[in-house]
Amino acid sequence: MGDDVGGARILVLADPDTLANQAAAAVAEELQVSIRARKRALFVLAGGSTPRGVYERLASAGAAAPWWSAVEFLFGDERCVPPDDEASNYRMVRESLLDPLGIAAERVHRIRGELAPAEAAAAYERELVELMGSETPQLDLLLLGLGEDGHTASLFPGSTSLEETTRWVVASRSPVAPHDRVTLTLALLGRARRVFFLATGRAKAAAVGAVLGSTSPQDLPATRVRALEGKPTWWLDRAAAANL
Ligand code: 6PG
């Protein structure tokens, strides 16, 4: 299933529900592949609204699965708001996945959005170094969304954070509120065995076409994320794939 176009593997599903069901199954499989190989899986969660359906299906299908105890939960970015704020990516993930699965707090690595952005970024980087060491970090499965401007995580077009090659976590600014963000940089986003992008809806069709266009993909943040193993997989519904 799916086509390889340039630097991506593209899977187009009929609608968001079908996508959520199939992407959840693929997430569960990839996490177990890593656990079999490395005894654990570092799972980087996407924020925004698109992934919620995938998280809900993972929670409902996997509640009894013992392998979840080998998964460490990380975040690709966070809005600089308290963890119980309705804009918090952590809150969305806690409600849709972590609480239903009963994930132990010590395996959830939350970006502390309640801190000042630079302080939160530095603290998260220290936590990731403690988790992975400082030399050759390896993430196992990275989920990412896509903004209508081609941003991913909280790496926005034209941002200096896109040029960061050393630090793994930086503060960034979003053109839409909440403006203060903390985001993983391409230095770390490029260290995932597998990368899954999720995009649904007509509003994303132009950005998807710009990033995946077979003729001349634009140099947008989402275009610059590579996977260690294979190509990034793009999970799209028909509406988001309309320009391909
Ligand atoms: C965030 C996300 C961001 C998101 C895209 C798409 O914190 O908002 O990290 O990159 O994935 O903006 O958001 P939607 O899924 O809400 O369309």
Image (cartoon, rainbow, N blue to C red):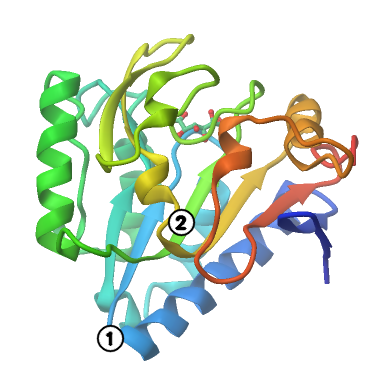
| Amino acid carrying mark 2 in the image | Leu
Q: Is residue 226 above or below residue 77?
A: below
For label 1, the crowd category at 10 Å Cα-Cα, with few meaning under 14, some 14 to 19 and many 20 or more, is few
Label 2, on which residue? 142
Neighbourhood count class around disc 2 (C-alpha, 10 Å): few under 14, some 14–19, many 20 upward: many
Nearest the camera: 238 or 62? 238
**On the rendered structure, is 41 left or right of 18?**
left
Q: Position of residue 201 (x, y in %)?
A: 76, 34
**Residue 139, how many percent across, how many down?**
36, 63
User: Residue sitting at 85 percent across and 53 percent down?
Assistant: 14
- Residue 107, how many percent across, how many down? 18, 62
User: Which residue is depicted at the point 34% across and 39% down?
Assistant: 165
Rendered position, 190 above or below 156: below
The residue where tag 1 is placed is 39
| Number of the label disc, if any, that sits on residue 131 | none
Answer whether residue 51 is visible to the viewer in this image. no
Type of amino acid at the residue the image marks with label 1: Lys
Disc 2/disc 1 C-alpha distance (Å): 17 Å
Quadrant of the image containing the N terminus: bottom right
Q: Quadrant of residue 34?
A: bottom left
Q: Earlier in the sequence, mark 2 or mark 1?
A: 1
Quadrant the C terminus occupies: top right
Q: Is residue 223 above or below residue 196?
A: above
Q: How many marks?
A: 2
Q: Splitting the image into 4 quarters, where does residue 66 fall?
A: bottom left
Q: Nearer the viewer, residue 153 or 80?
A: 153
Q: Secondary structure at mark 1?
A: loop
Whole-percent x, y for residue 30 in the image: 51, 75
